[in-house]
Amino acid sequence: MFISELFNRTPINLLATSMTVRSKNQDVIATNVANAETPNYKAKELVFEDQLREAVLGRKEDKEMIPMARTHESHLPTGAKPAFMPYMQLQHNQTVRNDGNDVELEKEIGRMMENATMYQASTTIAAKKIEGLKSAIMEGR
């Protein structure tokens, strides 16, 4: 379902943000894989999925709130949403080896594949949206 919502509701700038964040996420996962044998290394993750989903689908709270009125032109716009802010955290894996390393290689490879698939989906959707815009512009000539 999320893929179809991503295509139908997502402006191109949000797709670009998704691609940027997924690229950074791929770097974090690759770092975990590279440090799979490093003593005392703790696996990290970039937390952004819930924020991205809220940016695409809209937050539940937004739908339940009474809209604010802008009473003066110098006031800030009322429809502004908080910035999309991914953050890094430790994974807190249950499996810790004797050397203190908690990287689960199979889990990281799975995360890498899922992330790459979602990145590819974002690029494909962005390309289709741009293709649609080009078509609309060409027909308007």
Image (cartoon, rainbow, N blue to C red):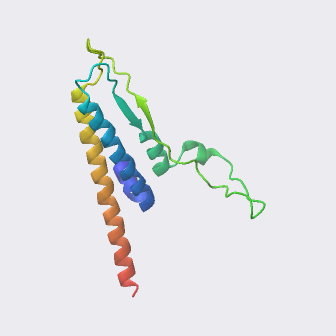
Q: Residue most toward the right?
A: 71
The percent position of residue 109, horizontal first and vertical second, equals: 22, 34
Quadrant containing the C terminus is bottom left
The percent position of residue 113, horizontal first and vertical second, equals: 24, 41
Q: Residue most toward the top?
A: 98
Q: 19 or 69, which is in the foreground?
A: 19
Q: Residue at x 26, y 39 (%)?
A: 112
Q: 118 or 42, which is in the foreground?
A: 42
Compared with 84, 42 (above or below) is above
Q: Residue most toward the front?
A: 39
Regarding residue 11, the answer to whether it shows in the image is: no
Q: Residue at x 40, y 85 (%)?
A: 140
Can you tell which quarter of the image residue 102 is in? top left
The percent position of residue 45, horizontal first and vertical second, equals: 37, 33
Q: Is residue 136 left or right of residue 106?
A: right
Q: Residue at x 26, y 29 (%)?
A: 35
Q: 45 or 53, which is in the foreground?
A: 45
